[in-house]
Amino acid sequence: MPGKPSLGLRLAFYLGMLFLHFPIVIIVLYALTTEDRTYQFPPPGLTLRWFGEAFQRQDMWAALWLSLQVAAMATGIALVLGTMVAAAMYRFQFLGKDFITVLLILPIALPGILTGIALLTTFKRLALEPSFWTIVIGHATFCIVTVYNNVVARFRRTGFSQIEASMDLGADWWTTWRMVVLPSIATALLAGGMLSFALSFDEVIVTTFTAADQKTLPIWFLNELFRPRERPITNVVAVFVMLITFLPIVLAQWLTRDTDDLHGGGKTG
Amino acid sequence: MVQMLKEPNTASAQAAVVLREVSCYFGSVKAVDGVSLEILPGEFFSMLGPSGSGKTTCLRLIGGFEQPTSGQIVLFGQDASRLPPYARDVNTVFQDYALFPHMNVRDNVAYALMVRGVPRPERHRRAEEMLELVKLAGFGDRRPGQLSGGQRQRVALARALINRPRLLLLDEPLGALDLKLREEMQIELKALQRQLGITFIYVTHDQGEALSMSDRVAVFNQGRIEQLDTPKQLYEYPQTEFVARFVGSANVLEGRLLGLEGGRYALRPERIAIRPGSQNGPNCLSGILLDIHYLGAQTRYEVQVGEERLTAVTSSEEQGLQIGSAVTLSWERGSLRPLREAV
């Protein structure tokens, strides 16, 4: 049995947690304050009024709707392309494979500002006007990585012999895909998809470079903060965004926890 | 599923599998290098060899999981060299069993029927029959993850047999099981093969397994067949040094040492008698006893004779032998088997 951590260690832990999570508490607190111009602390009073007002704001709804559309579209593209890349990288050996792995990870490893500038320059060169679709393409570049990572890990764990067994038992490629491959990567796809969705949903930097005058929800936030009216509304919306992005991430973690792992047959059984 | 066409004019004695000069290269590696063989219907045929000898690749070529670089594969009279796995009347038991973890045991076994569109009640009935055949009746609702290694092995077998293939490929199916279970399964597999009359091709690196179960054995080494024979011939008359050493660990002796004309000879350890004292003559050699291993039913002796180290095995422990002292090994002239020169 490991012993109890020392008092100092525990204190450091709680201070660290406080530092990380206190701002979140503040957001919730200021969503309920009666004071709407300054961030007075402690709030003079608590009210639910701002929730009602937030729901009245058409520009907020428009931004939310745009963000949801972009996230859904980028995630959809990432699911298809990410899975295809993962399958190819798992199954085949080819020249420059390691290089391609690096290329795949790059969009998420590079600072968003570089991805943004690169995309903007490319779109200009291709004479593509910034639009809904340029935002989607921008987001898809880093969404593909999350799907790829999840799916390729699952492929490695599953092993190829299940696919061979299916074909051996008379199933062609399409049936094998439907009956064996898809069920075994389903949770990986769900997890990768949810992470993609959450990443896209709160993306700011790449979006500013690839959008025209569209406002996704995070951009709407930035604009709101410069306007000193109805501050608590921003906090109300922030609370909702927290819930929308937090739940899928928790769900994704829960879905990818270890399930039945039969690879290796009876050696462990 | 594409059924293979039977040629109307062929007799029942038609070979189940014919390989003609089949090679399979992976880059510069010659995994299978010019293999030709013929396997008869109903035969229990083993491919024996160390890892990397090409036996598994050879099996995978027959199953359709690899494409031959050159040569021809004929299954039941039809050229199958380029057919995909699902178009062959062949099923496989994989080394890691390759069960589908998201399906229960019944759906695993019935998979081949589901793919062909057999209705559910019929499917379940036949899956239940197969489970009974492999002594797993009542396990249909379990998940593969809830079974032991031996049970998974039986599920894999039932799944591969449900289509009643004419040819079953087994890729080291018992490799992951412990010794006792392995011996039980050997007996069961052999009985099952007799009962169903299906041709079995069995890949193993375990020479005991190959000898005890097979009608014929092909010994693989470096992508080629060293010798193809019945287990008895293989053991009694090994043709090459590799076979002599790999199958039953024979002593290999230079003819010069024996006072015979050149070439090399195989001599089985159990054909050698050992006694104390130093005596040289025809069909005997003297040396120093290095070690005695008591193995229960047998006793094994390690003897240094000149440069060579020989092994003798007797069924009861010889008396009066001391480690480090001189002993004489003797045998009957007929026990020496001349070996072909290595190619």
Image (cartoon, rainbow, N blue to C red):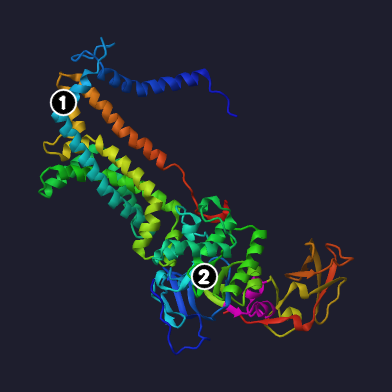
User: Percent position (x, y) of residue B245?
Assistant: 66, 72
The CA distance from mark 2 to mark 1 is: 69 Å
Residue stretch rendered in magenta on the structure: B226-247
The correct choice, above or below, for B262 with respect to A219 in the image is below
Q: Residue furthest bottom?
A: B9
Above or below — where is B256 with respect to A70? below
Q: Amino acid at mark 1?
A: Gln
Q: For the C terminus of chain B, give its image quadrant.
A: bottom right
Residue pictured at 54% horizontal, 80% vertical: B41
**In magenta stretch: residue B245:** yes
Residue A56 badge: 1
Left or right: B335 in relation to B244:
right
Which residue extends farthest front?
Answer: B121
Is residue B47 visible in the rendered image? The answer is yes
Q: Give the amino acid at mark 2.
A: Leu
Residue that protrudes farthest toward the top in the picture = A44
Q: Mark 2: which secondary structure?
A: strand
Q: Position of residue B182 (x, y in %)?
A: 64, 62
Q: Residue at x 66, y 63 (%)?
A: B184
Q: Quadrant of residue B233?
A: bottom right
B296 or B115: nearer the viewer: B115
Looking at the image, residue B335 lies above or below residue A252: below
CB of mark 2 within 8 Å of CB of mark 1? Answer: no
Report the side of B81 relative to A77 (left or right).
Answer: right
Secondary structure at badge 1 equals helix
Q: Position of B13 compared to A87: left or right?
A: right
Residue A92 appears in the rendering = no
Label 2 belongs to which residue? B169
Q: Report whether B165 appears left or right of A113.
A: right
